[in-house]
Image: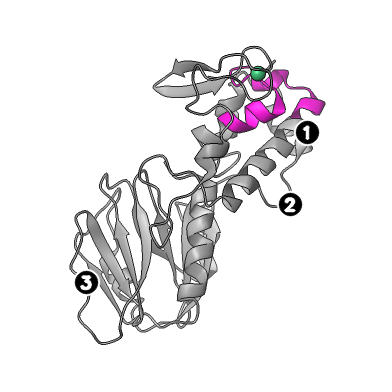
Amino acid sequence: MPELPEVETVRTGAEPLLRGRRLGGVELRRHDLRWPIPVAAVQGLAGRRCTAVARRAKYLLLHFDGDGAPVALVHLGMTGRFLVEPVAPRRPRPAWRPHEHWRLDFGDRLVRFVDPRRFGALDVAAGADLSAHPLLAGLGQEPLQPGFDGAFLHRVSRRRRTAVKALLMDARILVGVGNIYASEACWRAGVRPRRAAGSLSRRECDALAAAVGEVLTAAIAAGGTSFRDYRGVGEEQGFFARELAVYEREGEPCRRCGAAVRLTRDGGRSTYWCASCQN
Ligand SMILES: [Zn+2]
């Protein structure tokens, strides 16, 4: 499932291709994905110019000019691909692909949303009320923005019995960190992922916050992690999988101490960790 580095890779890929371009038309092949798509509001984006491609948590935010400065919110869900293809203006468009659900036609660029599992989302918000939009309102701290550090982690983890890894993955507290990067950050910080969050010392919180920042930054530099469905705007793979220390490395030697990486399953979620060098 895409996490922050994958969505950020799509954002940085899409922004230079879409910013400043006028949206000629919108085509929807269905009126719902994970949730209903507000068809009239999406169609109302046609004729407007894209002014920026931003990101909040795992939402891509396509900002448009004109009345109300609307913003299209796009979520990749589990298997979504936000593809941006160069096309010849005023020429026939390519045939629809299997599981392609909607298109944004920018004249010489065609955005195609392909999502076999249909857990993705498309919605529209008014620019002025963006942070109050129901999908964005309850979201927590951005891990690569000021405000995320050891002091923050220490503050939010006090008296909590929830596991450290679950805390890192709680989007009401910290956004964009899922199973892959939470596992990797715990390994980098030398912290057992199933420990109670409230047991973290301030020093451990400092190490964990630094580890989250490092692993996300390194993953963005590698174009994200492509295990299965995730691809960039040109369908390119991300290459962070080869740098993973524990995730999906069960039984392989820990890159720090050589002990076999362990796999623990709880609630259908896989946690990878090293029992010998994570405390
Ligand atoms: Zn180890």
Sequence-wise, which precedes: disc 3 or disc 2? 3
Q: In the rendered structure, which segment of residues is drawn in magenta? A: 183-206
Position of residue 12 relative to residue 225, above or below, is: below
Say what secondary structure mark 1 lies in.
helix
What residue appears at the point 81 percent right and 27 percent down from the top-left corner?
Answer: 203
Amino acid type of the residue tagged 1 in the rendering: Asp
Q: Nearer the viewer, mark 1 or mark 3?
A: 3
Asked if ligand 1 lies within 8 A of label 3, the reply is no
Looking at the image, residue 261 sits to the left or right of residue 23; the answer is right
Assess whether residue 190 is covered by the magenta stretch: yes
Assess whether residue 218 is covered by the magenta stretch: no
Q: Residues within 10 Å of mark 1 (few under 14, many from 20)?
A: some
> Disc 2 designates what residue?
146
What residue appears at the point 56 percent right and 14 percent down from the top-left corner?
Answer: 260
Can residue 170 be seen in this snapshot?
A: no
Instruction: Calculate the distance from the C-alpha at mark 3 to the C-alpha at mark 2.
Output: 43 Å
- What secondary structure is the magenta-colored segment mainly? helix
Circle 2/circle 1 CB separation < 8 Å: no
Which image quarter is the N terminus in?
A: top left
Can residue 117 be seen in this snapshot?
A: yes
Image region (quadrant) for ligand 1: top right
Q: Nearer the viewer, mark 3 or mark 2?
A: 3
Looking at the image, residue 161 sits to the left or right of residue 189; the answer is left
Asked if ligand 1 lies within 8 A of label 1, the reply is no
Which residue occupies the foreground of this view, 82 or 121? Answer: 82
Say what secondary structure mark 3 lies in.
loop
Instruction: Calculate the distance from the C-alpha at mark 1 to the C-alpha at mark 3.
Output: 50 Å
> Disc 3 designates what residue?
94
What residue appears at the point 76 percent right and 31 percent down from the top-left corner?
Answer: 207
Query: Residue 177: where, in percent of width, then height?
Result: 55, 40
Amino acid type of the residue tagged 2 in the rendering: Pro
> Disc 1 designates what residue?
206
